[in-house]
Image: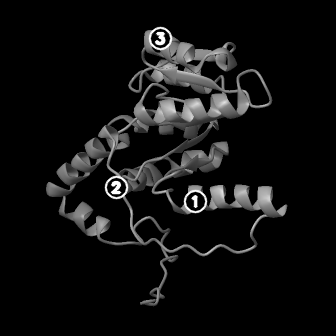
Amino acid sequence: VFGATSFVGQILCRYLSQQFGAGGTLRWAVAGRSRDKLEALKKELGKPADKLKLLVADAADVGALREMCSQTRVVVSTVGPYALYGEPLVKICAETGTDYCDLTGEVQWIKRMLDRHEAAAKASGARIVHCCGFDSIPSDLGVHFLQQRACERFGAPCTRVKMRVKAMRGTFSGGTVASLLNVVKEAARDPALRKSLANPYSLCPPGHESKTRQPNLK
């Protein structure tokens, strides 16, 4: 988990620690730029994290990022705004065949990563997956929770799930706000980017754009 001491990183690490501990069936480690903060996180996680490995790496330190990638099969990055800090890690993962996922919603950055590093990822076999967990509540996590309850109560998961959102309540984390502000700043100085952001198929490969509009279900 790269960026383990960030707001989202801490939530993820607590979940992994509670579900899997450390040194068990899932082998995982925490990474970030401050060893002191990583040590504090490990202490906060308690006994289940006694064997948790700490890796020190800065988002701008190519050597440290490459060393980190050499010790793992997949990197989960929570270091944002990704448009400002994310590319060096994506580049190294694409080149070294290290799988990568993040929770970015920065479409303009994803497009740049596709244009610049897709060929290298295909050559190395690296799976680069953006937007994991993006807007996942209540959809993904809601279904996950529902299926857990269904298995507990009825002994089997639901074969079909329909969702309707009546109302939502919540706020943005600091990282999300910073990412949104950066998108606005980039779009203000780039007319082509503004046009791309208005296109819902901007990330689709050429020739794969959908021509069918979703029907209005009202």
Q: Which residue is mark 2?
A: 108
Q: Which residue is mark 3?
A: 35
Residue 107 placement: quadrant: bottom left
Q: Residue at x 76, y 73 (%)?
A: 159
Which comes before the other along the chain, label 1 or label 2? 2
SS category of the residue bearing label 2: helix
Q: Nearer the viewer, mark 1 or mark 2?
A: 1
Which comes before the other along the chain, label 2 or label 3? 3
Residue extending furthest toward the right: 155
Q: For the residues marked 1 and 2, what is the alpha-carbon distance in whole angstroms?
A: 28 Å
Q: Nearer the viewer, mark 2 or mark 3?
A: 3
Location of the C terminus by quadrant is bottom left
State the image coordinates of residue 54 (x, y, percent, origin top left). Answer: 58, 15
Residue 72 placement: quadrant: top right
Q: Three-letter amino acid code at disc 1?
A: Gly
SS category of the residue bearing label 1: helix
Q: Rate crowding at label 1 as few (under 14), some (14 to 19) or many (20 or more) other CA atoms within 10 Å.
A: few
Q: Residue at x 64, y 38 (%)?
A: 97
Q: Three-letter amino acid code at disc 2?
A: Gln
Q: For the residues marked 1 and 3, what is the alpha-carbon distance in whole angstroms?
A: 35 Å
The foreground one among 115 and 194 is: 194
Please say if the residues under marks 1 and 3 sit with CB atoms less than 8 Å apart. no
Along the horizontal axis of the image, is 190 left or right of 41? left
Q: For the residues marked 2 and 3, what is the alpha-carbon distance in whole angstroms?
A: 32 Å
The foreground one among 73 and 113 is: 73
Which comes before the other along the chain, label 1 or label 3? 3
Along the horizontal axis of the image, is 38 left or right of 48? left
Q: Residue at x 78, y 55 (%)?
A: 152
Q: Which residue is mark 1?
A: 142
Residue 60, which numbered label? none
